[in-house]
Amino acid sequence: MRTLRTFLAVLNLFAVFSSSAFAESSTEIRATDDAGNLLSLNQPSGRIVSLAPHVTELLFAIGAGDQIVGADEFSDYPVAAKKIPRIGRAGALDLERIVALKPDLVIGWGSGNSSAQLAQLRKLGLKIFISEPRQLNDVSSSLRRMGQLSGHGEQAEAAAANFDTGINQLRQRYAHRPQVTVFYEIWDRPLMTVNGQHIISSVLTLCGGSNVFAQLGQLAPTVDVEAVLKAQPQAILGSGSDATRPMWLDDWRRWPRIPAAANGNLFNIPPDLIQRHTPRLLEGATLVCAALEKARPTTPGALTSP
């Protein structure tokens, strides 16, 4: 009888443990994406398809790089990202290839991916999470949410905290500097810039800059030379296709009526450090702040760099 009671007690403990383990493994993971959609997963994702370079970089930053089974053509950072199977470009995805990879999570880019293609992926039953950081704190928020979805919460929190600390340090240093009017040039033909809703504009503001085209409606609007002449920016920042200084940045010297050109305040910022919504944006912001400090007019009583 004692043996039977012992057996039943052990069996009961096993049942309680099994029930507890099952409850833990079946705990629902919920996260709201940047489009306002609530996504639910039964467990952390183990097979992720990234539809944008910044998404791939964010996932590697939180230790989830090995869980990426497919990535867009331009996902090239870190070096290990280049080995991931390709699923097309951000604006032209290979849907059949994505489905064949059997992902349990697809992370897309709100303004970079085709909304029609994202809708098709949803119709095929895939879980879609939209990433569209617009403000600097959206980067740390993205890290935390992706950490939650991928099962890397601790690493994500550490990466997010490090980014926030760096940004806050820059904010404290440059918050009270005299303002500098800035034209940020994405490309020359057509002549493109960013409006006030773009995360690059948030970087300009962080550094004490004022985006001269902040009021325009489009996220990345096309402007003309006459508009730049009228805006009279004190600094012009540009990013080409790679870290090399674009030749068109120095073409502004032909327009000495613009203060930025007259004073030689034409600065190159490597695109991967300023145009990707990732922790490396902290590096880009540091470069932008240093550039604007050089362009900042010296006025009586103005603060100087510590």
Image: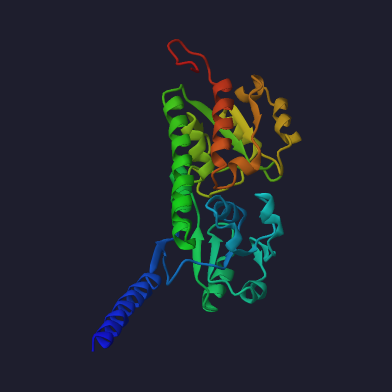
- Closest to the observer, 176 or 66: 66
Which residue appears farthest toward the right when viewing the image? Answer: 247
Q: Residue at x 40, y 61 (%)?
A: 32
Q: Residue at x 37, y 72 (%)?
A: 21
Residue 234 appears anywhere in the view: no
Q: Quadrant of the N terminus?
A: bottom left
The quadrant in which residue 177 appears is: top left
Q: Residue at x 44, y 49 (%)?
A: 157
Find residue 94 and report its horizontal and vertical position in percent. Answer: 67, 70
Looking at the picture, does residue 161 appear above or below residue 92? above
Looking at the picture, does residue 264 appear above or below residue 103? above
Q: Is residue 219 left or right of residue 84?
A: left
Find residue 175 and report its horizontal and vertical position in percent. Answer: 42, 27
The quadrant in which residue 112 appears is: bottom right
- Closest to the observer, 73 or 64: 64
Q: Residue at x 55, y 54 (%)?
A: 63
Query: What colour scheme does the image use?
Result: rainbow
Find residue 125 and report its horizontal and vertical position in percent. Answer: 52, 78
Which residue appears farthest toward the top when viewing the image? Answer: 300
Which residue appears farthest toward the front when viewing the image? Answer: 2
Find residue 93 and report its horizontal and vertical position in percent. Answer: 65, 67
Residue 187 appears anywhere in the view: yes
